[in-house]
Amino acid sequence: MEDGRLIPLSYISQYCFCKRRAGLLLIERQWNENEYTAAGRLEHEKVHIQNTERRQGTVFMSDMQVTSRKLGLSGKCDMVEAHPDPCGTVFPFLGEEKYILFPIEYKHGGLRSNAEYELQLCAQALCLEEMYGCRIEKGALFYIGSHRRKEVTFTDEYRELTAKTAESLSKMLEEGRVPAAETAAKCGRCSLNDICMPGVSGSAGEYMDKVYASFKEVQE
């Protein structure tokens, strides 16, 4: 897949949270900020400073660019830890020693369970595996508000679901269709609620086309 067609891997979590939200972001390039997205953005700005350091044998690499042409995804890992391990892999940028990579995704708020975040983390691991020919068994979500980690194991089920989600995103982009809204309690927390118009099927663009068509009929 050409670089220009690669989808931001963060859209994996967007799609799992709400297919319509993912469509509005991916196809219509819609965006709006609320208190939740603003808090998350500010916390991530503190994290996204590219840097590499070594502490007690472990290498910490922040803001690491990753890509998977197989999945059609591209993005950044907030943090990747490289732990020395004789059963690991040699990475050219880390010298001759063998390491096991451990990706970490930073999230706003306190420790909680979010399947969409775990799939996003799994996507990062799959990107790293494809880029460096390694195997990554685990990673972690770090919740900034509580300063706690939740370890995630990349099972076969997670890997398959992540790949299917990436495929669904690619298909959505190719077809250029925004899924219809499915109203739920989470809609109230969504920053795109006003743009989404949950009571209206189709995309905002389609809705405006219908309004324009009706206006033309009246004028004629």
Image: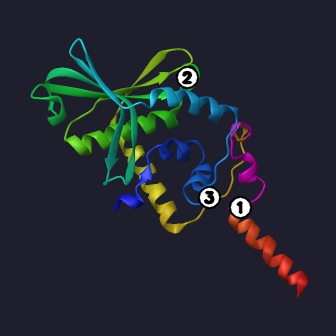
Q: Is residue 110 found left or right of 140 in the rendered image?
A: right
Please give the residue where the numbered disc 2 appears in the rendered image.
112
Q: How many marks?
A: 3
User: Residue 143 or 180: which is nearer the viewer?
Assistant: 143
Please give the residue where the numbered disc 1 appears in the rendered image.
204
Within-10-Å neighbours for mark 2: few <14, some 14–19, many 20+: few
Residue in the image at 55% along x and 14% along y? 146
- The Cα atoms of the two marked residues, 1 and 2, are separated by 32 Å
Displayed quadrant of residue 108: top right
Residue in the image at 78% along x and 54% along y? 199
- The Cα atoms of the two marked residues, 3 and 1, are separated by 11 Å
- The Cα atoms of the two marked residues, 2 and 3, are separated by 28 Å
Q: Which residues are magenta?
A: 188-204
Mark found first going from the N terminus, 2 or 3: 2
Name the element at disc 1: helix
Taking the image as drawn, is residue 75 in sight? yes
Which marked residue is nearer to the observer: mark 3 or mark 1? 1
Mark found first going from the N terminus, 1 or 2: 2
Q: Is residue 203 found left or right of 127 in the rendered image?
A: right
Displayed quadrant of residue 131: top left
Q: Please say if the residues under marks 3 and 1 sit with CB atoms less than 8 Å apart.
A: no
Instruction: Find residue 92 and report its horizontal and vertical position in percent.
Output: 14, 36
Q: Please say if the residues under marks 2 and 3 sit with CB atoms less than 8 Å apart.
A: no
Please give the residue where the numbered disc 3 appears in the rendered image.
179
